[in-house]
Amino acid sequence: MISRLAVCAILIASIAGVAMGRELPPPPVLTESPWNGDWILSPTRNTPEIKEAAADGYRFHLQPDGRIRWEIPSLHEVVEGRMDGQAMAIRRLKPTTLTLAVSAQGPRVLIYHLVRNGKPEGDGRMTLVDQGKAWVDISQPAGRPDLAGAVIYVRPDATSH
């Protein structure tokens, strides 16, 4: 009787496991970040003053595990690390004391903090818009929200927007 009970329990457990396995959702598929790739300063959506002051373009590579490679090619600037809000060294051709901390607020928003010699220099919020075809960077000097400004970047193939 015990052996029959054990066999029944094993059979029920295996049937339940198979049935439950069929109802589980498929494992998540790791997708490429909408930030990845090249971006250029929008020639039509920025004021002349902004165009003079802003970087010509960016290149991003965000990985599903939270790593980021952030580049500003015109400055020969590269930042690599994790999007965990911790400071990452900014590498340029000449040594710099700048660091950048980046964190993601969902897949469409990046928050960053720029620090020079341990002192906050600026903050920003980058938000994807236009179904991921553009992003707006609203930044300000540290502690000066009254001096905030906005810059718009687009994909190189979307310069007519």
Image (cartoon, rainbow, N blue to C red):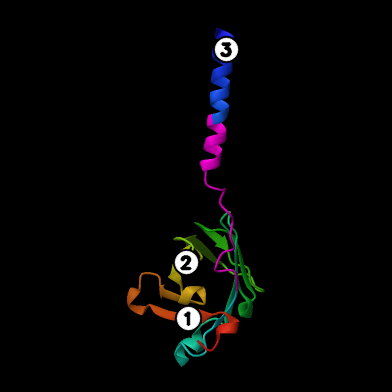
Residue at screen point 57% across, 12% down:
4
Local SS, label 3 = helix
User: How far apart are labels 3 and 1 at the CA level?
Assistant: 72 Å
Residue highlighted by disc 2: 108
For label 3, the residue is 4
- Residue 111, position as x, y percentages in the image: 45, 65
Q: Amino acid at mark 1?
A: Ile
Say which quarter of the image contains residue 62: bottom right
Number of numbered labels in the structure image: 3
Alpha carbon separation for disc pair 1 and 2: 14 Å
Residue 125: where, in percent of width, then height? 43, 69
Choose mark 3 or mark 1, whichever is in front.
3
Q: Residue furthest bottom?
A: 48
Residue 66, placed above or below residue 128: above
Residue 56 coordinates in the image, percent (x, y): 57, 83
Q: Of the numbered discs in the image, which one, if any, rests on residue 152?
A: 1
Q: How far is the residue under mark 3 from the one under mark 2?
A: 57 Å
- N-terminal label among 3 and 2: 3
Q: Magenta region: which residues?
A: 16-37
Q: Secondary structure at mark 1?
A: strand
